[in-house]
Amino acid sequence: MLKKLTENWVLKLLALVFACILWFFVTGEQKLERSYAVPLELKNMPVGMMVANDIPSMIDVRISGPRTLLMNLQLQNIGIAVNLKDLEPGLTTLKRLEERLNLPGPLKVTRLSPSYIDVKLERVVSKNVLVKAQLNGKPATGYRVAAVHVNPQQVMIEGAESEVAGLDSVATETVDITDVRETRREMVSLSYPARYSSLKNQVAVEVEIVIEPTPKQ
């Protein structure tokens, strides 16, 4: 045992000396504080659910520690990952975000903004809703809109349960019929400004606006 300890004792002594020098250099070095914008990542989303509230994509983090370590800290190597596995539908407050940062030992987090996040999970549902054509203007004098046909008449939306439940229809982009004298048929994009749901497949529909002369009195 003693023989093994004394083997290459010069190299071992040098290694110990360099380790002590490095330790004194790090611990005795001037302290520094710097601010970083750290990306926030949501991981392991439960199947069939989605986030239905605003979550910041970046967290402002202030870190203190030895100047050399801070200056060499690579932003792409640090981040905050939040594990959503096994969370139930509803609002969950996730605290202690600083503990999710992977930092070298001598570096410390002195401030986070925000220091916690609220995650609202909802079930993803879908349903069919009516399509309503939006018209602007009036036909030429002596003409009128006799009928408006939309094909398809319904489209499917998908998203957060609470938002989908409150929607019964989706509108088209506005079709201008100012001074029109004849029937128009065109493909029109759908206007869908919802935040936590979206159109499942259809993004445009065919709109036919039947224009005919105004019946004489």
Image (cartoon, rainbow, N blue to C red):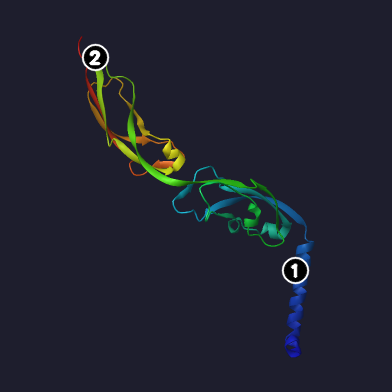
Q: Is residue 81 left or right of residue 205?
A: right
Q: Of residues 1 and 166, which is closer to you in this image?
A: 166
Q: Is residue 182 above or below residue 48?
A: above
Task: Say what secondary structure mark 1 lies in.
Answer: helix
Characterize the local packing of mark 1: few (<14), some (14-19) or many (20 or more) Cα atoms within 10 angstroms. few
Query: Nearer the viewer's eye, disc 2 or disc 1?
Result: 2
Residue under label 1, please give it: 22
Q: Quadrant of the N terminus?
A: bottom right
Secondary structure under tag 2 reads: loop
* Amino acid type, mark 1: Leu
Q: Name the residue located 77 percent from the left edge and 80 percent from the top edge.
A: 13
Identify which residue, 123 or 111, lies in the foreground. 123
Q: Where does residue 127 sit, x and y in percent of width and height? A: 36, 41
What residue type is disc 2 on?
Gly
In percent of width and height, residue 47 lies at 45, 54
Q: Quadrant of the C terminus?
A: top left
Q: Which residue is mark 2?
A: 142
